[in-house]
Image (tube, grey):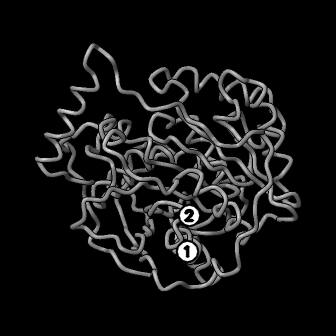
Amino acid sequence: MCTFSMTIKTFLLCLCLTACNGNEEVTEAETSSGYPSLLNKTVPVPAEYLGETASQGSVVQIDYDTRNYVDGNGEMRSNTAYVYLPYGYKESSDECYDVFYFVHGHGETAASFFQNENGMMRNLLDHLIEKGDMSPVIVVSTSYVYGTPVDYYPDADPYCKALPQELVNDLIPLVESRYRTYTQQTDLEGLQASRNHRAIGGFSMGAVTTWYALEYTLDYFKYFLPISSDGWSLGRFAGMNYPDETAAHLANIVRSSSSLENDFYIWACSGTDDVAYDRIWTQVQAMAKFTDVFDVNHLTFHEQEGAQHEFRAIAEYLYNALPSLFSNRQKTILHSVAFPFYSSKRRIHFSANTSLI
């Protein structure tokens, strides 16, 4: 979490009191996607973005304690995540960072995101930040399989469903108290207060997880990036087989979260030759019928021409999505006012096993 000097705190307090004079509230503008239509085409990644750059971020492995949220029996277990820290990250700096949590697909682990294709995703992040396409972001690669992938991918569904709860209860408090993020308190109230600076996304079964995150942890994430899979809230492949029912279910979830005032954004995507294209596109079209919840300011779909259901295609989705979610904007004082200063009331246990990859 970030800490601020007393001088800045005092200035912000005075500014807030001035802005709120006359019982006027300081509120953030409603989410705007910047896209004029539901269906959009992605732009190819420049070849140089897939190679190494001089300004390289670092990746840290973190082993952490969690519980068995699949069976709900409270049994203790451990899991592993990998944290990308952008080039120039310093603990001594006053700069705060947004955080993007990514969930892998079937047959992979948390390490896959930064290791596959000779570190392609890591190189992409380095270039996006170095060239100013997006603001420096902390990226966390997570896993629902605890190091042992299931043989038949639909069998991973219970683990995907449980992961958002694990993230909110265990991993997010650990990461966002250890590193310089906007989270000032790691209890549920503090995580909700900082949700505007947090996104979750995933590929294939990771996208199933992302849809579950929308359903169960909307209070703690503002941005959602499901890549090449529908939501399984009403059963396996329900987004494709029961799109209207799935869309109505998710719309009701959003409506019931009254504190958010529809402050969220879903950047859904797939490739035109991807086996899961029809699954996710069918669901997205059904969701778009609920214009009071899923208009283009809160839901857009992006297709990659000719892309198949493979890891390499993820690069183009992230190249297009991340600058939209984490624009390289100046952090203004008024932006900081929206997040009060908290003192942590929760003790976080860190595993001693941390290493670089």
Count of numbered badges drawn on the protein = 2
Q: Is residue 66 above or below residue 316?
A: above
- Circle 1 residue: 127
- Residue 237 position in % (x across, y down): 78, 43
Q: Is residue 1 above or below residue 357?
A: above
- Residue 239 position in % (x across, y down): 77, 38
- Residue 114 position in % (x across, y down): 55, 74
Secondary element under disc 1, as helix, strand or loop, is: helix
Left-right relation of 48 to 241 = left
Secondary element under disc 2, as helix, strand or loop, is: loop
Residue 343, quarter of the rendered image: top left
Callouts 2 and 1 close, C-beta under 8 Å? yes
> Of residues 57 and 6, which is closer to you in this image?
6
| Amino acid at circle 1 | His
- Circle 2 residue: 133
Task: Work out which residue is located at the far left of the displayed protein and give it.
Answer: 6
| Amino acid at circle 2 | Asp
> Of residues 305 and 19, which is closer to you in this image?
19
Q: Which mark is residue 205?
A: none
- Residue 250 position in % (x across, y down): 65, 29
- 10 Å crowding of disc 2: few (<14), some (14-19), many (20+): some
Left-right relation of 2 to 325 = left
Residue at the image point whose x is 49% and y is 57% from the top: 328
Which numbered disc, 2 or 1, marks the residue closer to the eye?
A: 2
Q: CA distance from mark 2 to mark 1?
A: 8 Å
Q: Is residue 353 above or below residue 302?
A: below
Quadrant (top left/top right/bottom left/bottom right) for the C terminus: bottom left
